Amino acid sequence: MLRNLDASYYVDPALHERERAAIFRTHWHLLGPASQVAEPGQYVAAELAGEKLFALRGRDGALRAFRNVCPHRGARLLEEGAGRCDTLRCPYHMWLFDETGRLRRTPWFGEDASFDTADWPLTPASVAVWRGLLFVSAAPELSLAEQLGDLPEEVADYPLETFVPVASHRFEMRCNWKTYTDNFVEGYHVPGIHPAFAAVIDFAGFETVAQNNMVRMTAPQKGGSIYGGKWLWMWPNWTLSVFPGGMNISRINPLAVDLTEQIYHFLFADISPETEAERTRTIETNCAIVREDFGICEHTQRNLASGAYRPGPLSPKHEQGVAWFQARVAAALAQKVARAAE
Ligand code: FES
Ligand SMILES: [Fe+2]
């Protein structure tokens, strides 16, 4: 019998710190559509499980990523989100860096013969683009292609890179990132939590397959459904769902052991004014579904934290994805412990 993870995985701050090192630092993170950094000077900055990184398109056309940490006294260089900067200047004491991360100017610093600007560049990070999506990593253990597992083949027939970003939405929920992920990788809760959604899919035909860094959930659609019937989750923390004429992508990001944010981007093939009402309906319906999940996840989190829960059984039909995800988390943490002991 498959069993749910022990509650301590969801509430223990020390374990959360181990996850940050064993999972988040070593993996690639979805930053969003790569079109956000199409032009020189454009950047995307994000805090990923507590580590600030940014990707920047230089004036030379090259895409680079750095830690968003000034080597002087540790200030944040760029505000989180997508934007444009003419110069890379720290807002604190105005040190100036070039697009390669080299320190160029240190106004009013004073004379110090032992100080050489060449010794104080920004710390580089890794950046990659896959099919129009932008990823960064502080210290990747695998190439992005390896991490993506079965995803490239799964979406080979969808014109992902032609979709245009139309809107992004950020949600915050008071639960562990795994409480929400467990919820995302099963359709078992659809009749209970999403009755309107359940009405437009054939729930008896809902299928979940977990393999090679991806959980694929599919369901036959009834007439008029705007969902598309394919929801994908990728290890360790991002999602991609295709629907007629577009897709949404999201990053599930821990802010603390009991606080999680999810940032969605909605992209469409047709962004003409005639389709605006339909696009708005798709975005609003999807966001409503996400909100429906928060309530159940937040109360589940409180029960996990209460000490009143012992690991229950997981459905072999519907919770394969939950079991797969939880096993990966446990293995990543165990591997980290084994390495530390070497
Ligand atoms: S912390 Fe950046 S210039 Fe001082
Ligand atoms: Fe849900």
Image: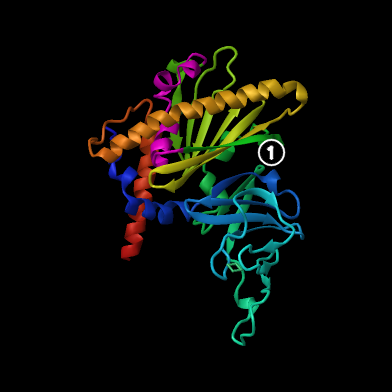
Question: Is residue 153 in view from this perspective?
Answer: yes
Q: Residue at x 46, y 26 (%)?
A: 292
Tell me the magenta residue range.
Answer: 173-200
- The image position of residue 214, as x and y in percent, is 48, 38
In front here: 71 or 73? Answer: 73
Q: How dense is the environment of label 1, judged by Cα within 10 Å: few (below 14), some, or many (20 and up)?
A: some
Q: Nearer the viewer, residue 102 or 110?
A: 110
Q: Where does residue 49 sit, x and y in percent of width and height? A: 47, 51
Left or right of 184, for residue 115: right
Looking at the image, in which quadrant does ligand 1 appear? bottom right
Q: Is residue 156 visible?
A: no
Type of amino acid at the residue the image marks with label 1:
Glu
- Residue 197 coordinates in the image, percent (x, y): 50, 19
Judge from the rendering whether residue 109 lies leftward or rightward of residue 297; answer left or right. right
Instruction: Give the secondary structure at mark 1.
Output: helix
Magenta span includes 192:
yes
Report which residue position mark 1 lands on.
161
Q: Residue 95: x, y in percent?
A: 65, 69
> Who is closer to the viewer here, 321 or 105?
105
Residue 86 lies in what quarter of the image? Answer: bottom right
Q: Work out which quarter of the rendered image holds the C terminus and state it.
A: bottom left
- Which residue is pictured at 68% across the width and 62% down the height? 88
- Quadrant holding the N terminus: top left
